[in-house]
Image (spheres, coloured by chain):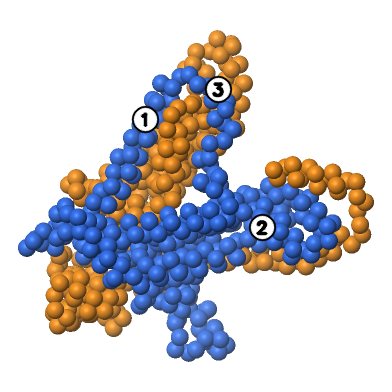
Amino acid sequence: MAFSAFATGTAQEQAPRRKSKIALILLLPGILYLALFFLVPLVSLVMTSFQQPIPNGDIGEYQTAFRWENYTDAIGLYGEHILRSFIYAILATIFALLFSYPLAYFIGVKARRWPVLQNLMLVLVIAPFFISFLLRTLAWKSILSDESVVITGLKALALMAPDAHFTGTPAAVIFGLTYNFIPFMTLPLYSTLERLDTRLLEAGGDLYARPSMTFFRVTIPLSMSGIVSGVLLTFIPAAGDYINASRDFLGGTGTAMMGNVIESNFLVTLNYPAAASLSIILMAVILVMVTVYVKRSGTEDLL
Amino acid sequence: MTDQAGLVLARAETTEPRRPGRRQRYGLGSWLLPTYTIIALVFLLIPIAYTFVFSFNNSVKSNIVWRGFTLDKWANVCDKAEVCEAFGNSLLIGVVATVCATILGTMIAIALVRYRFRFRSAISLLLFLPMATPEVVLGAGLAAEFLSAGVQKGIVTIIIAHVMFCVSFVVVTVKARVSTLDPALEEAGRDLYGSPNQVFWRITFPLLLPGIIAAALLSFALSFDDFIITNFNSGTTSTFPKYIYISAARGIPLQDLLAAGSDERAVVVLRHVEDLSEGDTAAVLGVAVGTVKSSNARALRKLRAAPALVGVGETV
């Protein structure tokens, strides 16, 4: 969806060749802005990642250098956090996909006959955005805290050990990540499933395919572009998130993700080179994973 | 390709008589899927309903157990001056950032659809990348730039950051609208001797307006709710999400309680926020393990003694 939006499509053909001066005037301010406040920061982040402390300097004082060891140090110290970030993000993405697909299928395919109901359900899907991301997460923290009805209830039914907690565990962090990014998964899935030609499903049945076979051989391949967009829109923010994993929200001991480490290095311990090299690692790994994933799923033209 | 396949199959369908028993395939889905959808939508709404209901809770400290109905929280929204100040800041930032991002983004969207120029794919990539970059990286990058340029962080740096991440979303939204626009309408305007200005403001702009409004609403929502990028670039300026974050931090303002730059603060953060071992903490700070232990003990004693923290010390 968002990813196909930039694909150079049919619009290009109707564009006239002349008047490139006007195009330049239209493009220049925005492009300069992005260059100045998106590209330059990335370069400055790369430079920061190689800095070294000023000898006998105060905490937070660094000078330009070419210190490769910042990277090996970061991986050595925070290898566990790096791994954890990607495992949590992958699990959250899988759960969000499993949660969203049937939902998007119902709204986009089964509810076509009732446009009002379809729109109402779409509003409900984006309803979580009506309150702040942080408030949503805090609400879950309260709902699932040890004193809450849910957890005391589960314990009374002996479904949970009496001394067990939910908040503060990796499961809680993955739960929070999943919940918070579900709309990002559901909306692109909806927009491809909404265009799904149901005659193709009937054709599958006519050719004696079982419903499950039709689903895996027809429905899934046809909705692949939505799946890819949804997975990327969920995975990328989830891998860099540090709200859910924070101890003040759903996380606890041993749930810190890369975002938490980058934040505390940058804003609290003022270790800018460590924060910068971790950011670059995060971005590099995400770019590699995204490229491999997009190639594997055969949807290169989306990017 | 899909459409062609659809046509072929549709033709096949019309020639073949409908077999009985066709409905059977939808048997299970006919009740399972709607039920699941209802449950899923209710699940998505739980935190909102909870927040709304518990805003009437007569709670003193923690807001987990129901303690009776009250309108106090609603009547005294601005009881704490910081809340409304933060809210006002967020509104101001949201409006300014939205106006700037919408203007910049709309111009780019029109250029991308209507004109041909070189470096088109490079520009598309530049617009796509900010959406594909994790927020921490965007936030830390800008903060690194401000740091090396010696810019004081405040409301202006927050606005700069917000415009940056909103522009791409505006471009996507407005571009979709521009490409559905019928060029014949503008042509008709020109045929009727409309000047380029008149054609733009009387025909193009009104037709684009729904897309522009949608883009503006989207960027306001993104700006108003942003925490991660803001946190890196706000300095001491408060915004609404930042206020929530700080209040949620169990009243442990680590940053404020222990002097900035002190070893104790660094030790507490490394040991308890990042969960490093004592050995790793010592390696990061370049001190002996014994120093880490003693700084940690000293810091925790200070933290536990702080009146706001009584009872939370054991978890730190």
- Numbered disc 3: secondary structure: helix
Q: Are marks 1 and 3 in contact (CB under 8 Å)?
A: no
* Circle nearer the viewer, 1 or 3: 1
Residue marked by disc 3: B203
Q: Which chain is orange?
A: B
> Can residue B7 be spotted in the picture?
yes
Q: Is residue B243 left or right of residue B31?
A: left
Residue marked by disc 1: A28
- Number of other residues with Cα within 10 Å of mark 3, as a class: few under 14, some 14 to 19, many 20 or more: some
Q: CA distance from mark 1 to mark 3?
A: 24 Å
- Numbered disc 1: secondary structure: helix
Residue drawn 81% across and 47% down? B9
Q: Amino acid at mark 2?
A: Ile
Q: Which chain is blue?
A: A
State which quadrant residue A39 falls in.
top left
- Number of other residues with Cα within 10 Å of mark 1, as a class: few under 14, some 14 to 19, many 20 or more: some
Residue marked by disc 2: A220
